[in-house]
Amino acid sequence: MQIKLVPGNSAGTVTAYYISRLHFLSSQGQYHDKIDLEFLRNLSSPYILHTNIFSQGKGNREEQFYLWFDPTTDFHTYTILWNPQHIVFYVDGIPLREFKNLAWMGIPFPTYQPMKLYSSLWNADNWATRGGLVKIDWTQAPFNASNRNFEDSNACVSYWGPTTSCTTSGTRGGWFWQTLNYSDQGKLKWVRDDYRIYNYCQDTQQFPEGLPPECYISTNY
């Protein structure tokens, strides 16, 4: 999806672009799956790109980034690659986060149920702005973000349940097996080194009894 974010003083607003479990209670329950991009607007700092992954009701996998451009002046392309190998978030074709499928270690990974695309613009000034210290200035409303040129890249089509169209050779020959090549891995390291501002795998206060097991896999983090 190409997105242009809310300009000006829009602190407290969050523009969200995500895929979530195909269900009317898409954000609830023990079976909740979600792959989440959220753009947090603050008053005195650039936009923060907040990412999270939920699988089988388990979340708390946040990573946050500053962007290397002003996302309010033009459209930029935000991509989610979700296949059986991993989940990768891209900005303008540059990978900024990879979450590998480590289900063999008992780490939940969304594989068994379809998800649906959502986009929203909402009031999150109770937590998104310095922990809720800065409230939305409603005199600056209306707040507008713009989406265009959505592309699904021949994604599998769900027929309500586990049945999908992923059996075609064309689909399996493309994104279904896509991984990060050497160049992508270098770009990923650049973003993590220079623009990542929060990584749950370094947050010992959130996990006082020990970091999640995937945090000890050096090839991931």
Image (tube, rainbow, N blue to C red):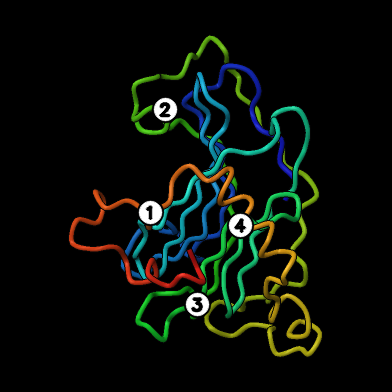
Q: Residues within 10 Å of mark 3 (few under 14, many from 20)?
A: some
Q: Earlier in the sequence, mark 3 or mark 1?
A: 3
- The x and y percentages for residue 74 are 78, 32
Q: Amino acid at mark 1?
A: Tyr
Q: Nearer the viewer, residue 134 or 30?
A: 134
Question: Given this view, does label 2 or label 4 mark the residue nearer the observer?
Answer: 4
Question: Which residue bears the numbered disc 3?
Answer: 101
Question: Which residue bears the numbered disc 2?
Answer: 129
**Whole-number angstrom distance, CA of label 2 to CA of label 4:** 28 Å
Q: Amino acid at mark 2?
A: Thr
- The x and y percentages for residue 178 are 70, 76
Q: Earlier in the sequence, mark 1 or mark 2?
A: 2
- The x and y percentages for residue 117 are 60, 57
Q: Earlier in the sequence, mark 2 or mark 4?
A: 2
Question: Which residue bears the numbered disc 4?
Answer: 189
Q: Check contact, mark 2 vs mark 4: CB within 8 A.
A: no
Q: Is residue 197 left or right of residue 74?
A: left
Q: Residues within 10 Å of mark 1 (few under 14, many from 20)?
A: some
Q: Residues within 10 Å of mark 2 (few under 14, many from 20)?
A: many
> Quadrant of residue 207 in the image?
bottom left
Secondary structure of the residue carrying tag 4 is helix
Secondary structure of the residue carrying tag 2 is loop
Question: Given this view, does label 3 or label 1 mark the residue nearer the observer?
Answer: 1
> Quadrant of residue 105 in the image?
bottom left
Q: Residues within 10 Å of mark 4 (few under 14, many from 20)?
A: some
